[in-house]
Image: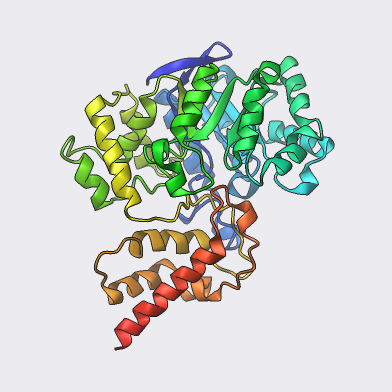
């Protein structure tokens, strides 16, 4: 396993485990609030085996949050790490101050959240602690979450007391929040920063979403300030791992045996200031392939980087919605499975090529069963929008999908 950086004297694996998409009993998304909890519970025994396998393969960085998997991620990861029987010094735990709700903005609430994280993870310290998604909601929200309440300064105290060993932040959204953190680096001495980075967002983040910032600029800014980078969304929520003929057309000639996921992960690992690349490895097959990709990592050549840039441009021509299936928008008060509907749109309604209306409608029926409510049930209430890290106008996109489905139905009816 390739390593570059150390955390508290411990070498960190270049491949990290993102504990947002844990294995579930029924195979559904672990962050899905739509169904009864008993139908979306984490498969703890499976997770225990996965964590043990990851550690055996040299993967020792585990990233979680109080907000992941309907609040279950930290607890389940803590159980799995304890069950593996390894000394605490064998692995790195990263978790976050995920104080998204206004009721969590007081310093007392932040302190309680950290205390709960320690209990859930069954540890007396956290290796890497993050201010979570600092730009989400705009600079005013960032200020209320971390500055006006003294939470950021309190995190400095945690580091001084070694209750956390490193302090960083993850970034989505308003660039002002990122700029503020960089401007105050002399005070906070950020030990790392977690950013969304992949070969599409590298130069084309604004084409994916107008509110985003190119990963190239973020990476180079952090590198200039000697702040190591942790990468999230290397596969764009899985979109760069699913087969896409436009992408494959650019990459397959260079390596016909390589999966699209391997290409995306190699791209991220190529950059020297990357500490670790997080991957949500739900299935055992993900673990085996990703471990092989990083054991050791083969950095991309200049020709391969050029091909990945062409692949990015080809991907953008498909006009996909930038949904990463994080499920933060759930639950919908009107019962829609929002991520599934958006994922269906990207798979079957994106692009301008010829369409088989009957086939698409059959796929829609399979992807979004009637009992889960489809796009035509959206009322446009907008309660989902503030929770989306990608700042997608979800009701607008759902309405567009509903209109497209109506067009397909009309074509079939003719």
Rendered residue at 45%/20% (across/down): 273
Residue at the top extreme, as displayed: 9
**In the rendered image, which quarter is residue 329 located in?**
bottom right
Q: Nearer the viewer, residue 234 or 307?
A: 307
Question: In the rendered view, does 87 fall on the left or right side of 254?
Answer: right
Along the viewing direction, whichever of 239 and 51 lies nearer the viewer: 239
Can the viewer see residue 287? yes
Q: Residue at left 56%, top 19%? A: 87
Question: Where is residue 404, by image quadrant?
Answer: bottom left
Above-or-below relation of 10 to 202: above
- At a point 58% along the width and 62% down the height, the residue shown is 34
Spot occupied by residue 232 in the image (x, y as percentages of width and height): 49, 36
- On-image quarter of the N terminus: top left
Q: Is residue 233 above or below residue 291?
A: below
> Whole-percent x and y of residue 162?
71, 16
Count numbered badges in the picture. 0
Q: Quadrant of residue 175?
A: top right
The C terminus appears in which quarter of the rendering? Answer: bottom left
Side (left or right) of 197 relative to 293: right
Q: Would residue 126 be seen by someone viewing this image from the given angle?
A: no
Above-or-below relation of 365 to 66: below
Residue 266: x and y in percent read 33, 30
Q: Position of residue 371 (x, y in %)?
A: 51, 74
258 vs 4, left or right, is: left
């Amino acid at each position: 396993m390739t390593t570059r950086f150390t955390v508290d004297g411990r070498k960190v694996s270049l491949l990290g485990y993102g504990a947002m998409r844990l294995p579930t009993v029924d195979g559904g998304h672990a962050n899905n609030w739509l169904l009864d909890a008993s139908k979306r519970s984490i498969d703890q025994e499976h997770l225990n085996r996965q964590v043990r396998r990851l550690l055996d393969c040299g993967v020792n960085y585990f990233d979680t949050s109080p907000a992941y998997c309907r609040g279950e991620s930290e607890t389940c990861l803590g159980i799995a790490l304890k069950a593996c029987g390894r000394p605490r010094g064998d692995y790195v735990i990263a978790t976050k101050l995920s104080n998204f709700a206004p009721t969590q903005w007081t310093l007392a609430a932040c302190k309680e959240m950290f205390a709960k994280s320690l209990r859930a993870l069954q540890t007396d310290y956290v290796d890497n602690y993050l201010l979570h998604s600092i730009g989400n909601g705009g600079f005013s929200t960032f200020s209320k979450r971390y500055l006006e309440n003294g939470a950021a300064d309190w995190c400095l105290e945690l580091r001084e007391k070694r209750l956390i060993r490193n302090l960083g932040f993850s970034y989505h959204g308003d660039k002002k929040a990122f700029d503020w953190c960089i401007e105050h680096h002399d005070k906070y001495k950020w030990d790392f920063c977690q950013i969304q980075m992949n070969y599409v967002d590298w130069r084309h983040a604004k084409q994916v979403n107008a509110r985003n910032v190119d990963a190239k600029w973020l990476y180079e800014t952090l590198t200039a300030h000697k702040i190591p980078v942790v990468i999230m969304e290397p596969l764009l929520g899985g979109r760069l791992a699913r087969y896409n003929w436009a992408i494959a057309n650019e990459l397959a000639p260079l390596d016909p045996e390589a999966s699209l996921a391997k290409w995306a992960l190699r791209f991220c690992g190529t950059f020297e200031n990357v500490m670790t690349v997080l991957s949500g490895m739900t299935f055992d097959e993900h673990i085996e392939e990703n471990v092989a990709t990083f054991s050791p990592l083969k950095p991309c050549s200049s020709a391969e980087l050029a091909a990945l840039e062409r692949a990015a441009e080809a991907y953008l021509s498909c006009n996909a919605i930038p949904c990463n299936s994080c499920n933060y928008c759930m639950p919908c008060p009107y019962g829609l499975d929002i991520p599934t509907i958006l994922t269906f749109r990207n798979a079957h309604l994106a692009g301008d090529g010829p369409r088989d209306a009957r086939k698409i409608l059959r796929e829609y029926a399979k992807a979004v069963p009637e009992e889960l409510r489809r796009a035509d049930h959206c009322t446009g209430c907008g309660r989902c929008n503030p929770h989306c890290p990608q700042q997608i106008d979800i009701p607008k996109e759902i309405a567009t999908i509903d209109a497209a489905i109506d067009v397909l139905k009309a074509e079939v009816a003719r």
